[in-house]
Image (cartoon, rainbow, N blue to C red):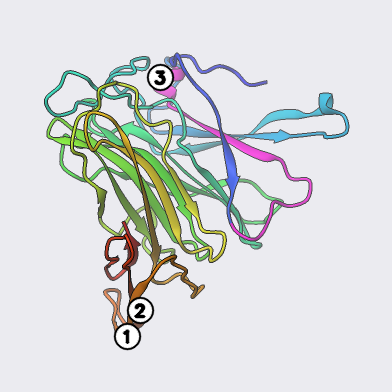
Amino acid sequence: MLAWLAGFGFQALTPSDLDGDNSLLNGAPNYYMRHRDDEAHNPGSNNPAEDYLEIWEFDVDWVTPANSTYTQTANIAVSEFDSGLCGFFAFNCFPQPGTGVTLDPLREVIMWRLAYRNFGTHEVLVGNFVTDVTGTDVGGIRWFELRRQAAGGGVWTLHQEGTHAPGGPTLNNWMGSIAMDGAGNIALGYNVVDSSTYPGLRYTGRLSTDTLGLMTVGTPTIVSGGGSNGSNRYGDYNALTLDPVDDCTFWFTGEYNPTTAWGTRIATFRFDRCPIDLEIFIGEEEAESGEETGARGGPQTWRRRAVVAGGARARRDSTLSACL
């Protein structure tokens, strides 16, 4: 039975969402997750050295729905995180320029999406949530990758985790959405805001071969904000998804503020080292190709391309190609 977490006024579990060509194994349940800061939810019996990710399985009996089950099957220890952003109940926290309106930190849930992949040899869940990275109500993004090595058997374990909090001691990074491509590369799109930065969108990522626990791409800007939001309510939620045609191209949809009214920006990008060499753009294009020595050593082929009709020129660095 699902127990309510003490300490939160609002809470919910996030369902996993399938990416890739390989489906869930026959008869497999859907996985739901939540994070548990035991200093908040189990005061007096908390472990000061770790916090937890819970996995719940929703197993539907389509013939006899009453026999369906919803069961916790994993309680995975992770590094300490702090859900106390302006306390545990407030929907007002992150400051904006030139206004007393502060934004909802959305501390209560693992953010959309909780992305699932079945690689055949192993299964993966990637997700993220916000944490206080300074102890003074500044948000950063805790991200994680869980694996089950024997697909359809074995147990879920923590493969890697990290905290993404660039931009100085006051910049809030939150509202993340994370996904993994068919090569195992991870990307993360998210919001930024503080008292001198209007709500905008950025992204980062890592190759599957990079050192565990690190986002190595940097912090490219998708769009900078141009005004402060007129309401404290924000997000719910951004979305980073994979193109089903090539399983390499990420599509990110996020909220930002061009003015005091929020807007939506859609961006697309992909890792140069995703192995499926298929790119599709609608409209006229300019394109060129060549070979160079990559930042990580050795020759790599590349394409630089731009959508000319009604779009901005594509931007490329040594790791990501992007159309923003």
* Numbered tag placed on residue 75 in the rendering: none
In percent of the image, x 20 and y 29: which residue is there? 228
Q: Which residues are magenta?
A: 20-42
Q: Position of residue 224 (x, y in %)?
A: 21, 44
Q: Pick the quarter of the image with the C terminus.
A: bottom left
Q: Are marks 2 and 3 in contact (CB under 8 Å)?
A: no
What kind of residue is marked 1? Gly
Q: Which residue is mark 3?
A: 40
Instruction: Choose the circle earlier in sequence order: 2 or 3.
Output: 3
In percent of the image, x 34 and y 23: which residue is there? 233
29 horizontally vs 176: left or right: right
Query: Residue 294 appears in which quarter of the rendering?
Result: bottom left
What kind of residue is marked 2? Trp
Q: Residues within 10 Å of mark 1 (few under 14, many from 20)?
A: few
246 horizontally vs 72: left or right: left
Instruction: Choose the circle earlier in sequence order: 2 or 1.
Output: 1
Q: Which residue is mark 2?
A: 302
Of circles 2 and 3, the one toward us is 2
Q: Residues within 10 Å of mark 2 (few under 14, many from 20)?
A: some
Foreground of the two, 194 or 306: 306
Q: Are marks 2 and 1 in contact (CB under 8 Å)?
A: yes
Q: Position of residue 177 (x, y in %)?
A: 42, 43
